Image (cartoon, rainbow, N blue to C red):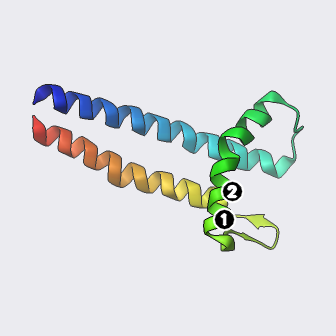
Amino acid sequence: MIVVSNALSAAATVLGSLLNIYFWIVIIAAVLSWVKPDPYNPVVRALRLLTEPVFYRVRKWLPFTYMSGLDFSPVVVLLAIELVNSIVIASMYQYALGLR
């Protein structure tokens, strides 16, 4: 059971790290949207490629996130990331510790 526990703990660590990286990507994309950067810049294009599909789905499922010219979909994505971190990742860690 130690192997399963270590594998689950490693998976939780990797998933948590990926979610934290995406958290910062969303924040950077939101801040960049305030200053209207060059759309042909490779960094800006990469950020849009990583975030826009998720933002589009949030806007589609929750149409009230875009009102009066303000887009609140990054806030919803950040809250969802924190919720997954707090519930799913923490539960994976606790379950992995219980298997030892």
Q: Which residue occupies 66% across, 54% down?
A: 55
The reply to whether residue 12 is in sight is: yes
On the rendered image, what quadrant is the N terminus found in? Answer: top left
Q: CA distance from mark 2 to mark 1?
A: 6 Å
Question: Is mark 2 in CB contact (under 8 Å) with mark 1?
Answer: yes
Q: Which residue occupies 62% across, 61% down?
A: 58
- Quadrant in the picture for residue 14: top left
* Relative horizontal placement of residue 4, taking residue 33 as reference (left or right): left
From the viewer's perspective, is residue 80 above or below residue 18?
A: below
Q: Residues within 10 Å of mark 1 (few under 14, many from 20)?
A: few
User: How far from the left and from the top, in percent, is residue 11?
Assistant: 33, 33
Q: Which residue occupies 54% across, 36% down?
A: 21
The reply to whether residue 27 is in sight is: no
Question: What's the amino acid at mark 2?
Answer: Tyr
From the viewer's perspective, is residue 23 above or below residue 64?
A: above
User: How far from the left and from the top, in percent, is residue 79?
Assistant: 52, 58
Q: Secondary structure at mark 1?
A: helix
Q: Residues within 10 Å of mark 2 (few under 14, many from 20)?
A: few
Which residue bears the numbered disc 1?
60
From the viewer's perspective, is residue 86 above or below residue 65?
A: above
Q: Which mark is residue 56?
A: 2
Of the pair 73 and 52, the residue shown nearer to us:
52
Question: What's the amino acid at mark 1?
Answer: Lys
